[in-house]
Amino acid sequence: MRFTGKTCLVTGAGSGIGRATALQMAQEGGNVVVVDLKLQSAQSTVDAIHASKGQAIAVECDVGASAQVQAAIAAAVKAFSALHVIVNDAAMMTFTPIVDIAEADFFKVIATNLGSVFLFAKYGVPHMPQGSAIVNISSVHAHATTPNVVPYASSKGAIEAFTRGLSLELASRKIRVNAIAPGAVDTPMLWDNPNVKSGVEKVNGPVGKPEELAEAICFVASDNASFVNGTTLLVDGGRLSALG
């Protein structure tokens, strides 16, 4: 029970990788703060946790909005007193060439994917004791990408740089910071991708299950990974080789 007595906040936890991670952390004894843009989705995950006798609360939050992030952290601390794990999973993609994309759409992707990682670190770290961990969800697109997803790929590359830098800043606090870079995972984000639908981006090789990513995230977030810090773990089934 790696998360017994620990409070685990997971963004984007209403579906996909975030939901699978929240469920596993609850199964392993964690008090889970389920954060999602849609309260109904967050509550669905909480209901599943409660059905298994776990502890969780649902929080509606636009992770790119500072006031809402601060409110989510306040709700977590009010409910469970502290934060021990933050998993930044919430993300969005656009599928428009750079010369055609609206400025607002570009910066929305950056705010949601990268800005959220900054905000949850800035306002969450003061509530995290020694031995805590932050896990940021990157992507193989940070390393090799396809056309028309430049904002997404850029945000994920920046997340990995942010992870390395923040791990140095938090070393004195004994808080670890790592990233996970998934490949193709069986989630709506994969199958709703117009590049995948059109065949521009080929899904070669195995497609991972959200639960498989959750296993990796939970390992990195747990004390079992106490010697893992400032790095990105590829969990991609060989996807990066296919993209490259």
Image (cartoon, rainbow, N blue to C red):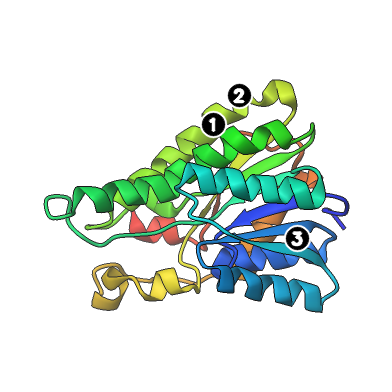
Q: Tell me the residue that label 2 is attached to.
A: 168
Q: Which mark is residue 164?
A: 1
Instruction: Please determine whether, in this image, residue 160 is positioned above or below residue 43.
Output: above
Q: Tell me the residue that label 3 is attached to.
A: 25
- In percent of width and height, residue 197 lies at 29, 77
- In percent of width and height, residue 219 lies at 72, 52
Give the residue displayed 54% in from the left and 31% down from the top: 164
Give the residue displayed 48% in from the left and 55% down from the top: 62
Give the CA separation, mark 2 to mark 1: 7 Å
* Element assignment for label 2: helix
- Label 2 or label 3, whichever lies nearer to me, is 3
Other residues around mark 1 within 10 Å, as few (<14) / some (14–19) / many (≥20)? some
Give the CA separation, mark 2 to mark 3: 26 Å
Q: Could you tell me the amino acid type at mark 1?
A: Arg
Q: Could you tell me the amino acid type at mark 3?
A: Met
Give the residue displayed 49% in from the left and 42% down from the top: 66
